[in-house]
Image (cartoon, rainbow, N blue to C red):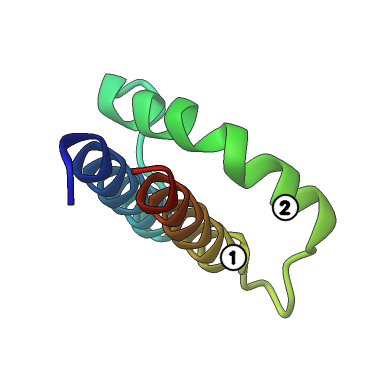
Amino acid sequence: MGTLGQLIHYASVVYIVLIIARAIMSWVSPSFGNPLVRWVYRATDPLLRPIQSIVPALGGIDFSPVIAIILVQLAERLLLSLIYQLS
């Protein structure tokens, strides 16, 4: 895997970790005064908010993080396959 492929892979891993961190934070109700909490929410909102508006919480459980992780992994695989085909 070339340098661009590695960058795409690492970026997707970091974004998935942020999504998981946000899901965990939603269980413990963190203080939004904390800059790290605000940063994680700002980083993940662009992907999670549209999913949350389409897929409602079922039984009080928000499945948007799971869907977002699947979408990030699909996007990574698509981009990596395009890179491999072009090289």
SS state under label 2:
helix
Q: Nearer the viewer, residue 81 or 34?
A: 81
Q: Specify the quadrant of the image occupied by residue 11.
A: top left
Q: Which residue is mark 1?
A: 67
Left or right placement of residue 76 versus residue 58 in this view: left
Which residue is pictured at 43% across the width and 60% down the height?
Answer: 77
- Kind of residue at badge 2: Gln
- Kind of residue at badge 1: Ile
Q: Which residue is mark 2?
A: 52
Spatial distance from mark 2 to mark 1, Cα to Cα? 10 Å
SS state under label 1:
helix
Q: Is residue 74 above or below residue 83?
A: below
Q: Position of residue 67 (x, y in %)?
A: 59, 65
Choose the circle earlier in sequence order: 2 or 1.
Answer: 2
User: Looking at the image, is mark 2 or mark 1 nearer the viewer?
Assistant: 1
Left or right placement of residue 10 versus residue 85 in this view: left
Dividing the image into 4 quarters, which one contains the C terminus?
top left
